[in-house]
Amino acid sequence: MSKLFLIPTSLNPEVNSAVLLPNELLQIRHLEHFIVETAKTGRAHLKQLNLDTPLQQLQIEELNKHKQDISKLIEPFKSGKDVGLISDCGCPAVADPGGRVVAVCHEMGVEVVPLVGPSSILLTLMASGLNGQKFTFHGYLPAEPDARKVKLKQLEQSILKENSTHIFIEAPFRNQKLFEAMLTTLHAEIKLCLGVDLMTSGQKIITREIAKWKNSKFDFNKQEVIFLIGK
């Protein structure tokens, strides 16, 4: 039976060593076929894996938010080949287009093998001090200010009633606007956790009540940030 290996990658593009466990590296050394989010970034990750096949001979196919047709990507499975799936950053198929391939593999009867590696979502949740028993990842909140405000108030009610934690992300150039919107919209006692530039020398994971964030000055533009709110 063919297998799809879900291969996590570093959250820091400057890290030049693999983030996988030794036994996981052994499981994937034989792979020759890979599905990546971006070819250039994918090759940089593959170069670190010490595969049996030289990098130049690997079969690498892109799957990103712009590519919808995955028929070519699943061809290796039809001939019994194993395939590796790699995201540009972190765990594949989580906030990542690779989930479409995983879904098709289940339909085809291909075994899906997730490997252990860094997830910005879980790393920030672990270090946040917020409720890790009941949490939801929302992806992106609405960019339009009024719709974003409505969504934030809905999440606030969920926090106050159910003590749930809500996790979301934003494009780096909109981080500051989202941060400021939360300060003006959310109840003063709601806690906001920011996970900034994880796995880098500048990593910061800070949890404070909204009231205390209002007395702080931060500029998060052009940084990778995970946002969590809860109590």
Image (tube, grey):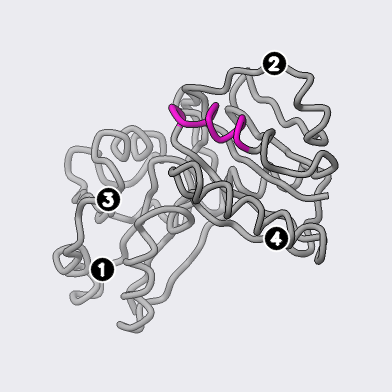
* Depicted 95 relative to depicted 14: above or below: below
Disc 4/disc 3 C-alpha distance (Å):
27 Å
Q: Residues within 10 Å of mark 4 (few under 14, many from 20)?
A: some
- Disc on the earlier residue, 1 or 4: 1
Q: Nearer the viewer, mark 4 or mark 2?
A: 2
Q: Residues within 10 Å of mark 2 (few under 14, many from 20)?
A: few
Q: In what element is the residue under mark 4? A: strand
* Depicted 178 relative to depicted 78: above or below: above
Q: In what element is the residue under mark 1? A: loop
- Disc on the earlier residue, 4 or 2: 4
Place of residue 220 in the rendered image (x, y in percent of width and height, measured from the top left): 57, 23
Badge 3 is on which residue?
A: 64
Place of residue 105 in the rendered image (x, y in percent of width and height, measured from the top left): 34, 75
Badge 4 is on which residue?
A: 135
Residue type at the position of mark 3 = Asn
Residue type at the position of mark 2 = Lys
Q: What stretch is highlighted in magenta?
A: 172-181
User: Camera-side residue: 181 or 229?
Assistant: 181
User: Camera-side residue: 16 or 196?
Assistant: 196
Badge 2 is on which residue?
A: 217
Residue 141 within the magenta-colored segment of the rendering = no
Q: Residues within 10 Å of mark 3 (few under 14, many from 20)?
A: some
Disc 2/disc 3 C-alpha distance (Å):
35 Å
